[in-house]
Image (cartoon, helix red, strand yellow):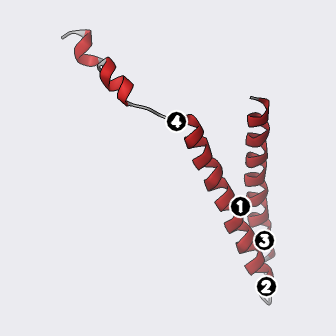
Amino acid sequence: MQVSDILPSSQLIRSIHFDWREALNTFLYKLTRLHGQLEEEIRSELKRRFPDSLRLLRLKKVRLHVKDRLHAHVLRERRA
């Protein structure tokens, strides 16, 4: 067995193109969507006659975590 049998050819390596900016944009998009969904869940919970305070607390904690991740990413992008 030769090394060339194990490693992919240089042509295959060149054909694999991964755009990191596109992946990060997808990541940011998903985080933004998640933040919006959490916001909507919080609004709908607050509209209930007897809102579940524990559920609201969990939703707000997760929303804050998502917001922190978005903010940290934007700061990293500005520095680069």
Q: Which mark is residue 73?
A: none
Mark with earlier residue (3, 2)? 2
Query: Which residue corresponds to mark 3?
Result: 56
Mark with earlier residue (4, 1)? 4
Query: Which residue corresponds to mark 4?
Result: 19
Q: Residue furthest top?
A: 2
The span from disc 3 to disc 4 (Cα, nearest Å) is: 38 Å
Query: Which residue corresponds to mark 1?
Result: 35
Report which quarter residue 60 is drawn in. Answer: bottom right
Label pair 2/1, CB-CB below 8 angstroms: no
* Foreground of the two, 2 or 51: 2
Q: Nearer the viewer, mark 2 or mark 4?
A: 4
Q: Nearer the viewer, mark 2 or mark 1?
A: 1
Side of 24 relative to 52 (left or right): left
The span from disc 2 to disc 1 (Cα, nearest Å) is: 19 Å
Mark with earlier residue (2, 4)? 4
Q: Residue furthest bottom?
A: 49
Q: Position of residue 36 (x, y in %)?
A: 70, 65
Q: Nearer the viewer, mark 3 or mark 4?
A: 4
Side of 51 relative to 15 (left or right): right
Query: Which residue corresponds to mark 2?
Result: 47
The span from disc 3 to disc 1 (Cα, nearest Å) is: 14 Å
Label pair 4/1, CB-CB below 8 angstroms: no
* Foreground of the two, 61 or 67: 67
